[in-house]
Amino acid sequence: MKSILPFRLKLSGKDEFRGLHAISTSFRFQGFLRLEGHVLTIEWGGVAQVQNVGALSIRDDRLALPDECITVPVSHLYRATLAGGWWRPRLALQASELGALAVVPSEEHGTVQFWYARGDRTVALAMAAALSDAIATT
């Protein structure tokens, strides 16, 4: 079975102050989860928005971040659950091996939250069920 779920990753920005300059950086990531048999492929790309505010100037830059892709054997996953209900829908994916998802932006303690659009709820339900079934059989 092949399932594809579009997602967004939420990552905290950062603010720095250097003398009279304030630099604010925010990130936007989006991508796809693809399950094929017992292998999960995670693809994502994004942009960084950098705002540099000085005493006499304001500069706004948008930087493209490189596209990334990893494949994770389902045997390296512990759990896939839907969370957030109607208002904040997301698929929470927890690794059984701490480093399995470490390169994915927003990964925290082996868990990544994949935020999806409400219109993709049916796909997310199917993805969570397929992942749970694959995890249970490995």
Image (cartoon, rainbow, N blue to C red):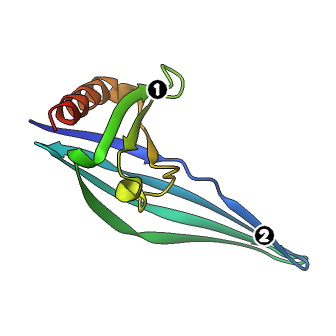
Residue 74 coordinates in the image, percent (x, y): 22, 45
Q: Quadrant of residue 102?
A: bottom left
Q: Nearer the viewer, residue 50 or 1?
A: 1
User: Label 2's element?
Assistant: strand
Q: Quadrant of residue 91?
A: top left
Q: Residue at x 34, y 25 (%)?
A: 121
52, above or below 31, in the image: below
Measured in 3D between alpha carbons, the distance from the residue under mark 1 to the one under mark 2, in whole angstroms, is 33 Å
Q: Residue at x 50, y 64 (%)?
A: 47
107, above or below 84, in the image: below
Q: Is residue 91 left or right of residue 17?
A: left
Residue named by callout 2: 16
> Which kind of residue does numbered mark 2 sit on?
Glu
Classed neighbour count for the residue bearing mark 2: other residues with Cα under 10 Å, few (<14), some (14–19), many (≥20): few
Quadrant of the image containing the C terminus: top left
Q: Residue at x 27, y 49 (%)?
A: 76
User: Label 1's element?
Assistant: strand
Quadrant of the image containing the N terminus: top left
Of the numbered discs in the image, which one, if any, rests on residue 83? 1
Outermost residue to the top: 86
Q: Is residue 22 left or right of residue 103?
A: right
Q: Residue at x 45, y 45 (%)?
A: 111
Residue 50 coordinates in the image, percent (x, y): 65, 69
> Which kind of residue does numbered mark 1 sit on?
Ala
Q: Is residue 30 left or right of residue 138?
A: right
25, above or below 33, in the image: below
Classed neighbour count for the residue bearing mark 1: other residues with Cα under 10 Å, few (<14), some (14–19), many (≥20): some
Question: Which label's residue is closer to the chain start, 1 or 2?
Answer: 2
Of the numbered discs in the image, which one, if any, rests on residue 120? none
